[in-house]
Amino acid sequence: MRILVASVLNCLLATAFVLPTTPALAQTPEATAQSSQPKPSEESIRRLLEVLQARKLVESMAVQVDAMFKGMLEKQLQGKNLTPEQQRIIQARQKKVTDLFKELFIWESMEPIYFKVYGDTFTQPEIDGMTAFYSSPTGHAVVEKLPLAMRASMTEMQQRVKEMLPKLEQMAKEAADEVKDKDAGKSDSKKTG
């Protein structure tokens, strides 16, 4: 269960950092107030995504998440002597996970999402401004170094998640115990009443 929760949290973190301009909340009050501004053209969004190397980043996510899953699996199996049959089972499961990530992070399925999100969130002047910035030397540096920052962030967040999981599990246990106690109390009061 812990590995599943950690995997989901890490995938969400990875997705949140895909692109430097991916908004956390697409419909903020500021975005809604800007609705009177011209919507960006598809061509301008396409140009921005090219400058951001969005395709490369999206496609690299499958590899990163797959590597993370394999690392977590190896850690779980560390020190265990697996039979050849168990190794085949693990390899088959890893292939299914790899195939799933490749299917999820394919550019052709992600591109329309970016067009919609960017088109609904940003105005034409904002898209133009971001394109100008990310075309600059500083912008290129951000695009090139963002994957490194993302990996470092994920490593740090994995540690935080690992520290947090026992607390979350304890809180869930306490909540379940409290519900059970209340149900037991109702049953006792019905028997005496």
Image: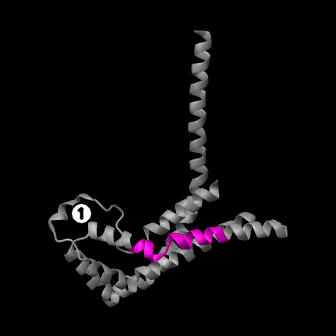
Asked if residue 68 shows in the view, the reply is no
Q: For the stretch drawn in magenta, what is the main secondary structure?
A: helix
Vertical arrangement, residue 105 with respect to residue 137, above or below: above
In this view of the protein, which residue sits in the foreground, 143 or 51? 51
Question: Residue shown at 29%/78% (left/top)?
Answer: 45
**Residue 24 horizontal/vertical position (percent):** 36, 63
**Residue 86 horizontal/vertical position (percent):** 80, 65
Can you tell which quarter of the image residue 25 is in? bottom left
Mark 1: few, some, or many residues within 10 Å (few <14, many ≥20)? Answer: some
Residue farthest to the bottom? 137
Can you tell which quarter of the image residue 132 is in? bottom left
What residue span does the magenta drawing correspond to? 95-111
Q: Circle 1 sits on which residue?
A: 31
Residue farthest to the front? 108
**Residue 26 horizontal/vertical position (percent):** 31, 62
Can you tell which quarter of the image residue 188 is in? top right
Question: Residue shown at 39%/86% (left/top)?
Answer: 141
Magenta span has 100?
yes
Question: Residue shown at 57%/77% (left/top)?
Answer: 63
**Looking at the figure, which quarter contains the C terminus?**
top right
Residue farthest to the top? 193
Check disc 1 and give the amino acid type.
Answer: Ala
In this view of the protein, which residue sits in the foreground, 78 or 94? 94
Vertical arrangement, residue 19 with respect to residue 184, above or below: below
Magenta span has 114?
no
Q: Is residue 190 left or right of residue 31?
A: right
In this view of the protein, which residue sits in the foreground, 102 or 136? 102
Residue farthest to the left? 36
Q: Secondary structure at mark 1?
A: helix
Number of numbered callouts drawn:
1
Question: Residue shown at 69%/66% (left/top)?
Answer: 93
